[in-house]
Image: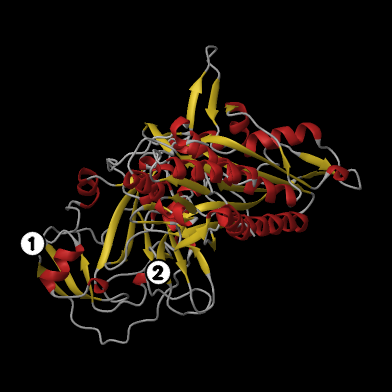
Amino acid sequence: MRWSTYFWYTSKEEPADAEAPSHKYLLKGGFIKQVASGIYAFTPAGYRVLKKIENIVRKEMDRSGAQELLLTVLNPAELWRETGRWDLYGRELFTLKDRHGRDYCLGPTHEEEITDMVRTFVNSYRQLPFILYQIQVKFRDEKRPRFGLIRGREFIMKDAYSFDTDEFSALMSYETMKFAYERIFKKLRLKTLMVEASVGAIGGMSSHEFVILTDYGEARVAYCESCGYSANAEIVKLNKGKEEEEEERQLTRVHTPNTRTIEELSSFLKVPPRKILKSVLYIVNGEPLLVVIRGDREIDENKLEALLNTENFRLATDEEVYALFKTQRGYIGPFNIPKDVRVIWDNSVYGIKNAVVAFNEPDYHYINANPGRDFSYGEFFDVAQVVEKDPCPKCGAPLKVSKGLELGHIFLLGTRYSLPMKAFYKDQQGEDKPIYMGCYGIGISRCMSAIVEQYSDELGIKWPTVVAPFELNVICLNPSDAEQKTVAEKIYYQAQEMGLDVIYDDREASAGFKFADADLCGFPYRIVVGKKTKEGKVELQKRHTGEKLDVPIEDAVRIVKEFVDKDKE
């Protein structure tokens, strides 16, 4: 490919609002173009990368025995109503009506449609098991799209679905997909961590995520370097601690003006935040809920959602706080609580001694409050965010906590969809049994960003050879020099003949401009044709290491081909 005729345009300007390196470099490098918030088009160069990622995924799925198909983007509401997800999925579901008033959604995932297809054709145990998959565009009405392809409203996914006769067979399919995912990410050169995860809105029996650790991920990941345990932080169980060994002191009422936050109260009383009880009022499906947690902890609303089994909850307004407790936010305490207010206590509160507690009185707190003597516990649950150095639930060693970007998610669904949709088969005794299912997703377009997150520097992208838009970039420093131009053309044609993906930068531009574009666009190998042609040599550059080699002109392409073949092993 000659750059002068290729539809590829880079930019030297820093994109506005691009925080993540991948977002910045994919825009500057001309791989994607923003169409609207969270919606991106792929240029020819970007599409080349995308197709290479797809092909690696497709090859491993086929190798695992999965069969490719293509489902619809537009899903009828009737299918989603069968499983209850039309209402459960929430605002992230793009919905629309046709001219006849019928409801549809733009599929964010395809459990309903694939189950509908399978129940149409499968009726016997003899037809099971099998795995079906597709690579398809998906839609999710993200409240706050961010970081380019990392969190968009339109994205490309590979989603697979397994169908089995029983739980044991379904587990075998689950393990098959788990191993396939490990191979896929290894071939994409992505360093991923497999973590236990919540089943969320998909539902089911078990779930794992494949994540990369990055500051631009939307998930929090906890992992133990001692025993190898790893999980999405929202499912890490934090148990009750031991009772503090401390002598109970006298309960004292203290004037605490202008201390509506834990930080202000801690500073005013000169006590650590962990000695303060924090009470947070929520409205859940229209009903009040008070959550009591230690002052140094934050509530994990994902844990709270799982506990309440609803996403329909929010923080109470100042007016709602006053109506129930006759006080201001920041001075709520678990005392003299109205009967219609449910109270749950986080495990972090258990065993606390001589705590600072609000008693629903503006500008006053009590110090040295103790359970049993001054207040009574209620229901205990784990709703606290996991933080660094919390104990590992498996071995007790300190946990590490990082932000993570989910690239793949696998679910053992069981009969979550087959039962409500009546996807049954007849067993050997002729009895109707629900099909056991699994679902397995990989964010294809998100993988593109993830690769850039792991393979970039201050100059631009450093594509792994297996997904690079072009494996080799040929640059002629002085196209007006007949000898240099002839050598560059010869190398370009030779590279094509040897099966390399090559782009020849024959644009009328300065050497510095071409070098900057080569670094930005991340070609693994670069052959620079310059003055050394008079000595029978060209310069070979490796983008990943920065290494530069002077090689004989006649050997240059062969050497690159050997490097490329080795990279792909």
Q: Earlier in the sequence, mark 2 or mark 1?
A: 1
Q: Quadrant of residue 492?
A: top right
**Foreground: 178 or 374?**
178
Tell me if residue 310 can be seen: no
- Residue 558 position in % (x across, y down): 61, 55
Label 2 to label 1, Cα distance in Å? Answer: 29 Å
Relative to 318, does residue 263 appear above or below in the rendering? below
Q: Which mark is residue 510?
A: none
**Foreground: 78 or 346?**
78
Give the labeled residue for mark 1: 257
Crowd rating for badge 1 (residues with CA inside 10 Å; few <14, some 14–19, many 20+): few
Q: Does the residue at mark 2 contact the one at mark 1 (Cβ under 8 Å)? A: no
Which color scheme is applied?
Answer: secondary structure
Tell me if residue 127 can be seen: yes
232 lies left or right of 515 = right
**Foreground: 359 or 503?**
503
Crowd rating for badge 2 (residues with CA inside 10 Å; few <14, some 14–19, many 20+): many
- Residue 84 position in % (x across, y down): 57, 37
Give the labeled residue for mark 2: 347
Q: Describe the element under mark 1 as helix, strand or loop.
A: loop
391 lies left or right of 76 = left
Amino acid at pointer 1? Pro
Q: Residue at x 28, y 79 (%)?
A: 353
**Foreground: 193 or 89?**
193
Relative to 509, does residue 343 appear above or below in the rendering? below
Q: Quadrant of residue 373?
A: bottom left
427 lies left or right of 221 = right
- Residue 126 position in % (x across, y down): 88, 44
Q: Describe the element under mark 2 as helix, strand or loop.
A: helix
